[in-house]
Amino acid sequence: MIWNIATGAEKSRITATMQSNASIVFSPDGSLIAGGTSDYQVHLWRVADSSEVAVLSGHTGYVYDLAFSPDGALLASASYDSTIRLWDAASSSEVRRLTDCNGSLVNFTFSPDSTLLAVAASEGLCVFNVATGELGAFFASNDWLNGAVFSPDQTIIATAGKDYTARVYGLP
């Protein structure tokens, strides 16, 4: 449901079958909502009228994490099939598939300028070049990383680990 915060009234309703750990995100301009569903797909809905505008297919496992790039050009989806897929947000076509990160993929985030994707995984931190899909850096970890975030100037990535440790990595 989409609520009018000022009045508390329901504005519109989006209906989909979502698994218990589904992800849902707004596009940066607020015009779209993307949701990962139990049918291994990503659904895109227009906020203005709750209409479904696209279904992104290709994953072979639940889609558990989603993020739009800050510039709104790409949507990234992570699945239990151990892939992250990058989708063109305008055409809904798959741009590339990222599979070279060690271990189970946990969480990811785009850099502020949308050129890099940091992936927190069970065996470390992977940093991908979004334009080429190449793994640009890997930082091993002794324990699962639960999350990652870029500094505003993109020179540092901070991670949170399952071992209750925050780590900071400088980028080359």
Image (spheres, rainbow, N blue to C red):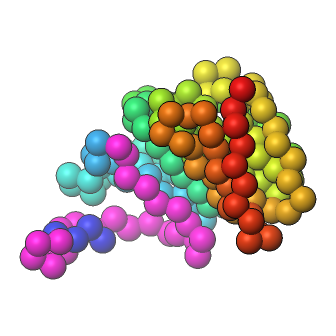
Q: Can residue 85 be seen in this view?
A: no
Image quadrant where residue 139 sits: top right
| 30 w.r.t. 99: above or below | below
Check if residue 21 falls in the magenta segment: yes
Q: Which of 49 and 155 is in front in this view?
A: 155
- Residue at left offset 76%, top offset 41%: 126
Residue 70, given in percent of the width and then of the height, sits at 43, 38
- Residue that protrudes farthest toward the top in the picture: 132
Residues shaded magenta: 5-28
Image quadrant where residue 97 sits: top right
- Residue at left offset 82%, top offset 58%: 122
Residue 22, given in percent of the width and then of the height, sits at 56, 66
Residue 12, given in percent of the width and then of the height, sits at 22, 66
- Quadrant into which the N terminus falls: bottom left
- In the rendered view, does 65 fall on the left or right side of 138? left
Q: Nearer the viewer, residue 82 or 165?
A: 165
Q: Nearer the viewer, residue 32 or 105?
A: 105
Check if residue 2 falls in the magenta segment: no
- Residue that protrudes farthest toward the bottom in the picture: 8
- Residue at left offset 28%, top offset 48%: 30
